[in-house]
Image: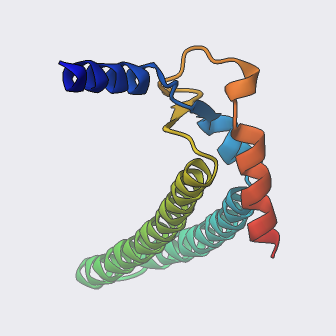
């Protein structure tokens, strides 16, 4: 009987222990994380350069097509049709090349962003373990925290740690 009472009291005491829970505003964390901001800026610059390249190539191709149209009126119909087919193929090839470059840029950007998200998750996990948290929840847009006290908001602390590690 004494053993049963002892077991019950241990269970009650362990059930009464409060669990340490915090939350992170995912949106704010990512917006304030310097590495993520830098990666976005780098890919924005690359995307703008690719857009300029696309515009330049398109403009050059349009000029070539207009020059061909002027020449085509003086050519034999069969020869004009043959040349027109070549220009069409070249235009398709250029379009495919530009599309491939765009897809490579997007894939590269997505890979870097996935890496950053993984890094952030590892840091949150390490922070939670080091500071005795049972749970750290994600808040912000699409997050699971609808309300939390400011005392339980770990966003600033984790952003500070991430930015310090990135700076080094």
Is 122 on the left-hand or right-hand side of 80?
right
Q: What is the quadrant of residue 104 in the picture?
A: bottom left
**Residue drawn at the location 49% of the way across and 38% of the way down:** 134
Position of residue 110 measured from the top left corner of the image (x, y, whole percent): 48, 61
Q: What is the quadrant of residue 34 in the picture?
A: bottom right
Q: What is the quadrant of residue 120 in the picture?
A: bottom right
**Residue drawn at the location 24% of the way across and 21% of the way down:** 2
Please say whether residue 55 is visible from this viewpoint.
yes
Is 41 on the left-hand or right-hand side of 147?
right
In the orientation shown, which residue stands out farthest toward the front? 2
Position of residue 23 measured from the top left corner of the image (x, y, whole percent): 60, 32
Depicted 83 relative to depicted 145: above or below: below
Position of residue 98 measured from the top left corner of the image (x, y, whole percent): 47, 72
Image quadrant containing the N terminus: top left
Is 129 on the left-hand or right-hand side of 5?
right
Depicted 30 relative to depicted 115: above or below: above
Is 167 on the left-hand or right-hand side of 89?
right
Please say whether residue 34 is visible from this viewpoint.
no
**Residue drawn at the location 80% of the way across and 52% of the way down:** 160
In front: 57, or 1?
1
In the orientation shown, which residue stands out farthest toward the top? 147
Position of residue 17 measured from the top left corner of the image (x, y, whole percent): 49, 25
Count of labels shown? 0
């Amino acid at each position: 009987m004494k053993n049963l009472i002892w077991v019950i009291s241990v269970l009650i005491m362990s059930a009464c222990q409060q669990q340490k829970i915090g939350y992170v505003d995912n949106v704010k964390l990512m917006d304030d994380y310097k590495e993520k901001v830098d990666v976005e800026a780098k890919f924005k610059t690359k995307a703008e350069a690719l857009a300029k390249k696309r515009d330049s190539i398109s403009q050059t191709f349009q000029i070539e097509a207009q020059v061909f149209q002027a020449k085509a009126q003086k050519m034999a119909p069969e020869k004009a049709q043959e040349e027109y087919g070549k220009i069409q193929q070249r235009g398709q090839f250029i379009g495919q090349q530009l599309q491939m470059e765009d897809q490579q840029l997007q894939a590269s950007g997505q890979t870097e962003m996935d890496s950053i998200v993984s890094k952030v998750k590892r840091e949150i996990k390490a922070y939670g373990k080091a500071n005795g948290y049972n749970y750290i929840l994600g808040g912000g847009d699409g997050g699971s925290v609808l309300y939390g006290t400011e005392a339980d908001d770990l966003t600033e602390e984790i952003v500070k740690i991430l930015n310090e590690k990135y700076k080094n």
